[in-house]
Structure formats: structure tokens, C-alpha cells
Amino acid sequence: MEAHFPTAFFEGKKVHLGVCGSIAAYKALELLRALCRANLRVTVTLTEAAARFVSPLSFQSLGAERVFTSMFAPAGAAPQDSPLSSPFGHLAPGAEADAFVIAPASATTLARLACGLADDLLAAQALAWSGSLLLAPAMNPRMWNNAATRENCATLARREHIILRPEQGRVACGEEGEGKLPDLRLIYLHCLKALSPGDLSGKKVMLTLGPTREPWDAVRFWSNHSSGRMGAALAVCAWLRGAEVYALCGPVAPWLPPRINRLDVITAADMLFQAEKLWPDMDMGIFTAAVADFAPEPFGDKKFKKSGQEAFSISFFPNPDILCKLGRVKKPGQLIVGFAAESERLEENARHKLDSKNADLMVANLIGVPGSGFSGTCNTALILDRKGRRESLPTMPKSDLAWRILDWLSTL
Ligand code: PMT
């Protein structure tokens, strides 16, 4: 999965993964791997049809703690040979799991769930589960669009189960339409969301992320090395924890789930324009973007020719400081997190930025050293807050740092 998705904080949580008969069943193996990499404990149920596409052994080999395949032991088998090894095993995942996902979910299983039937093991387990199910359907587009399937989905949505719409595209039988298993990244993140604390629900969070790009001539621009990873990690963690998230993304920014409101911008002026529109309605602003402090005096819309040129100079003019401008109009109750990218005197410079920009929290990171700052997947941060507190954090994945920063915000 993507480097900006969190992996810590979910260790030991239990997910039950149901898999239905579909050619997309093999993708459930990839989902299992991602969940296991985040140190989640995963049990699996394969429907009879699913077990024709993928084998229980594949799931066991990739880390599933237990794989259920049928309600009853084969006739004549000893009770300990039962896949459930207890007469009430069909109730076990429902009682023990922290999240229950079915991916791929077939039309038959959706129908069983909508009707409350418990005539196969997966449906019985789902019926004995009291929380929201996460359902990721995959099927032929005509089956998906059939009134029966639509009504079953509407029924399940009314009961507050989460249904991720299948994707548009060419399905295994060659037909085009809506029916492909939703993006695995989305299914994975929704699993994590089901396990997240929800402490930011009801909050609106705006983030700036990535670099800005300041055009000079028809082909060249002024920019920096920001990958947008730090900001994307914060956007994802805030969304997982229940916030309504608005991400103002510079021209380089990683994939974000569609439920995050993403606004793509190019220049510092574009970013400021969007940020000023959103800010009055926000509870928090998190400014990770490496905004170009200066922009070149534009050469124009033609390409600058090198012929006859040896050395030349370009004039630069200052760009607006977005954080500073919004910090000045911050209302009581609004929180601002700034980032300070420094090559020297980290704490002194960051403390100055915290005060001068009217931020509540400043995350300082050194640039030009391994495991910190631009581009990589890890960062090393010093956190300073307006109450005078500080915490020096070791090098860790940007996604884990993002989670820690949000923890800090709740203490302000
Ligand atoms: O994107 P990555 O590759 O993951 O890298 C992450 C990062 C290094 C970009 C990030 O961790 C970081 O440090 N972001 C801030 C970079 C920066 O521009 O720092 P600064 O010290 O120049 O600015 C201080 C603060 O003011 C920042 O919150 C910045 O977003 C904001 N600012 C700065 C200038 C400007 N014109 N407008 C701003 O809003």
C-alpha cells in the first residue's frame, strides 16, 4: 500500500475478511497482506464459490490466523476436524472482530445479507455481527445494475453498512461497465477507518501540501523537492479519525481517497486563493506545503531561447505567506499547525515561526539529512506548541508522525 497510509496504531486489532465467489477473489489476498503488514490480526471466511477461485492455503500462507470454509465438518469426520471446531464457531468472528469486511461481495451474498438469511457460513457470521459491515462488491455490470441488487444495496445502506461502489471498466467477461472491485487502497483505508478512534468527527480540517510551481517561461518553472507525502499522510489520518478534510494540493501530491475533498493548485497565489475561501469555515489548518517564497518575474508565454546567451539573471518577487495571512485572521477555537523546514538552528527558527505566524503547533524538520524533510517516506520532527511544550521525536514513517501530530492537537 502507499507510504502515506498509517501502519502503527492498529497493531493487534482484529479484522474478519469475508471473500465471495468472483474472479476478483485473488485480490483479497493482496488486501490480507496489507492488513497483516499493519500488524492486524485477520481471520478469513471463504464462501464455497470463493474457494473455487482461491484456496484456503493461500490465505493461511499469507498470514490469516484462521480460515473458515464451511458450516459443518464433512459427514463422518470427528468434531475436531470441523473447520469451526466448536458448535458456535459461526458466531465467533462476530463476537471477536473489531471490523468485518467482505471483499469481493457477490450479488448472492448482498441478497443474503439484505434478507437476513444465514444459509451459508459467511452470511451466518455477518448476521451475528452487530456493527457496520464494510462491503466491496464486484460482479458483472448487468448484475450490479439489476433492480434486485440495487434494492438490496439500498436496504444495506439504510442499515448503516458501508458499501463501496464498484469501479467502472472492463470486467473479466469482457463487458464494460460498473462492476470491478473497488480500488484496494480504498478498501484497506476503510478497514482502518472502521478501527480508528473517530476523535475528529464533526471537525473540518484544511491542509496545504506539496510544492507550489511558479512559472517563468512557456516551459520552465521555479519549485522545490516536496513530494506531498507529509501532507497526504496528515490528510489521510485526519479523515480516518473522522474529520471532513479539504486538501489543497500542489502539483506533486500522492493519491488521496475520494472522500477527501481535493483541490489541485499550481502556484502560491492559487493556493492562497483557495485557502482564503475555505478558512473561515474550518476548525483546523495544517500547513505542510513547501510554498515557493519567491516567484520569478514572468518571461512570458514564449520559450526563452538559449542561443546567444551566456549568463543572465532573473528577478524574483515575494509570494504571499499563506500561513501568516490566515494566522492573522484566526478566530477563537481555530487551530493552526505550521511546519518549519530548516537547515540549521532548528528549534530557534521554529519557535520564531510559531510566534510570528500565530500558529498553535509548529512541526520542525531538518532538511538535507537522511530520514528527515523532503521526499523520503520518513521524517524526524521536533514539535513545539504555544504553551511552551516541546517533544523531540525519533525518525519514523511520515504516516506515523502524522498520527502523533493529530494526538498533540487534542492536547491544546
Ligand atoms: O512533501 P514532503 O516531500 O513529504 O516533505 C515534507 C516537508 C519537508 C515539505 C514538510 O515536512 C515541511 O517542512 N513543510 C514546510 C516547508 C516550508 O515551506 O517551510 P517554511 O519554514 O519555509 O514555512 C513555514 C510555514 O509557513 C510552513 O507551514 C509553510 O507551509 C508556510 N508557508 C510558507 C511560505 C509561504 N509563502 N506560505 C506558507 O504558508
Image (cartoon, helix red, strand yellow):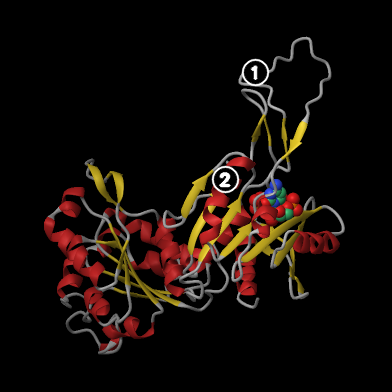
The image quadrant of residue 135 is bottom left
Is the residue 221 above or below the residue 51 in the image?
above
Q: Is residue 41 left or right of residue 108?
A: right
Residue 371 visible to an observer of this rendering: no
Residue 36 picture location, percent across and down? 49, 68
Is the residue 110 above or below the residue 224 in the image?
below
Question: SS for tag 1?
Answer: loop
Residue 180 picture location, percent across and down? 30, 50
What residue lies at 64% left-to-right and 18% top-to-bottom?
303
Q: In this view, does 114 lie to the left or right of 283?
A: left
Q: Which of 87 and 132 is in front in this view?
A: 132
Residue 219 picture location, percent across and down? 63, 24
> What residue would you read off at disc 2?
273
Residue 340 picture location, percent across and down? 75, 57
* Res. 303 mark: 1
Which callout, 1 or 2, points at the residue further toward the start of the chain?
Answer: 2
What residue lies at 60% left-to-right and 51% top-to-bottom?
209
- What type is the residue that disc 2 sits on? Phe
Question: SS for tag 2?
Answer: helix
Is the residue 158 above or below the residue 107 in the image?
below
